[in-house]
Image (spheres, grey):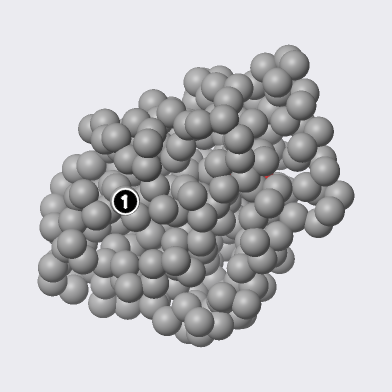
């Protein structure tokens, strides 16, 4: 489905019925990174997976794609699709967007799942590194980022060539403008640490045990700071944990949705 939202065409997959689960992908990916969640969970829930601005089939504008802007895009999309709150599931950059959404639109949240992500901002050095990478991408194309990042998506001991090829395929579909915009947007993202104590919805924090991009210690910090949050560490998984270990990820998510009662809340949203 394509919608014109906040002045850009935004592309979204939307299927199933019931409690809405909204999946936000990481960088430099697109909604296809959630395919194995989408295909499995659509039989029991309404599953909604947008391409964030600048990725997949969604377009963007020149300049930083800020996390608050991406959150506003998701909110505008949800306003079109439904009326009630959702369970928001964000991976890495998608987690930064999910936290921005939690800050801006708390009433639209029914539950939160933070996957391989963190609340803190970039250090000055990390932000400078992102800006330098953005310049390299402008000069040499998205390949710069794809080659650096693809192997880090999977656990070091699990570099399955077939999975790596799929990850590269998703990443290679990114445009220079999309990648540059997201790099600049992530570099200027605000510190969300103070927000964590205010999160009042059931929260699940998931990390791959072997994630070297956002180490599991970041997930531990999130789970400690959010009241009642459940921390789940998936073994033999790197940064793209839901893609690398989809069965275990889906099992955990279902278990959490059942344990918290979210799975059986009547949907007023669809
Ligand atoms: C991601 O996976 O979305 C990015 O690695 C996040 C980041 O670079 O901070």
Say whether residue 10 is visible: yes
Residue situated in front as seen by the camera: 65 or 82:
65
- Can residue 258 be seen by looking at this rendering? no
Nearest the eye: 123 or 256: 123
Height in image: 178 above or below 82?
above
Compared across the picture, whether 132 is left or right of 59 comes to right
Q: Residue furthest right?
A: 125
The answer to whether 57 is drawn above or below residue 200 in the figure is above
In this rendering, the answer to whether 255 lies above or below 116 is below
Q: Residue furthest top?
A: 140
> Is label 1's Cβ within 8 Å of ligand 1?
no
Residue 230 position within the rendered picture, expressed as x and y whole percent measured from the top left: 49, 75
Q: Quadrant of the C terminus?
A: bottom left
Count the marks: 1
Residue under the image location 51 percent in, 55 percent down: 68
Q: Position of residue 256 (x, y in %)?
A: 37, 69
Name the residue located 18 percent from the left edge and 62 percent from the top edge: 83
Mark 1: few/some/many CA within 10 Å (<14, 14-19, 20+): some
Q: Which residue is mark 1?
A: 76
Question: For this view, does 234 lie left or right of residue 255?
Answer: right
The image quadrant where one finds the N terminus is top left
Q: Position of residue 146 (x, y in %)?
A: 65, 25
SS of the residue under disc 1: helix
Q: Is residue 56 above or below residue 116?
A: above
Could you tell me residue 74's position as x and y percent?
37, 50
Image quarter of residue 149: top right
What residue do we see at 31% from left, 67% from top? 108
Name the side, left or right, on which 175 lies relative to 238.
left
Residue situated in front as seen by the camera: 107 or 167: 107
Q: Which one is nearer the viewer's eye here, 195 or 217?
A: 195
Residue 119 picture quarter: bottom right
């Amino acid at each position: 489905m394509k919608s014109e939202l906040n002045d850009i065409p935004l592309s979204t997959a939307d299927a199933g019925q019931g409690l809405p689960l909204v999946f936000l992908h990481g960088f430099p990916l697109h909604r296809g990174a959630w395919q194995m969640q989408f295909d499995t969970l659509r039989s029991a829930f309404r599953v909604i997976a947008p391409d964030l601005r600048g990725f997949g089939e969604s377009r963007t504008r020149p300049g930083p794609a800020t996390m608050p802007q991406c959150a506003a895009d998701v909110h505008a999309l949800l306003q079109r699709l439904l009326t009630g709150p959702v369970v928001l599931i964000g991976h890495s950059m998608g987690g930064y967007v999910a936290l921005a959404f939690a800050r801006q639109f708390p009433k639209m949240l029914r539950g939160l799942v933070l996957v391989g992500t963190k609340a803190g901002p970039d250090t000055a050095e990390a932000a400078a590194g992102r800006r330098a990478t953005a310049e390299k991408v402008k000069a040499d194309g998205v390949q710069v980022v794809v080659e650096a990042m693809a192997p880090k998506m999977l656990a070091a001991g699990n570099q399955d060539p077939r999975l790596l090829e799929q990850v590269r395929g998703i990443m290679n579909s990114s445009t220079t403008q999309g990648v540059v915009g997201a790099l600049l947007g992530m570099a200027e993202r605000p510190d969300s640490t103070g927000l964590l104590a205010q999160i009042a919805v059931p929260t699940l924090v998931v990390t791959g045990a072997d994630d070297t991009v956002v180490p599991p210690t970041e997930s531990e910090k999130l789970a400690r700071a959010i009241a009642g949050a459940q921390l789940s560490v998936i073994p033999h998984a790197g940064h793209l944990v839901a893609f690398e270990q989809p069965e275990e990820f889906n099992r955990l998510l279902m278990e959490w949705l059942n344990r918290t009662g979210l799975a059986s809340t009547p949907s007023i949203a669809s």
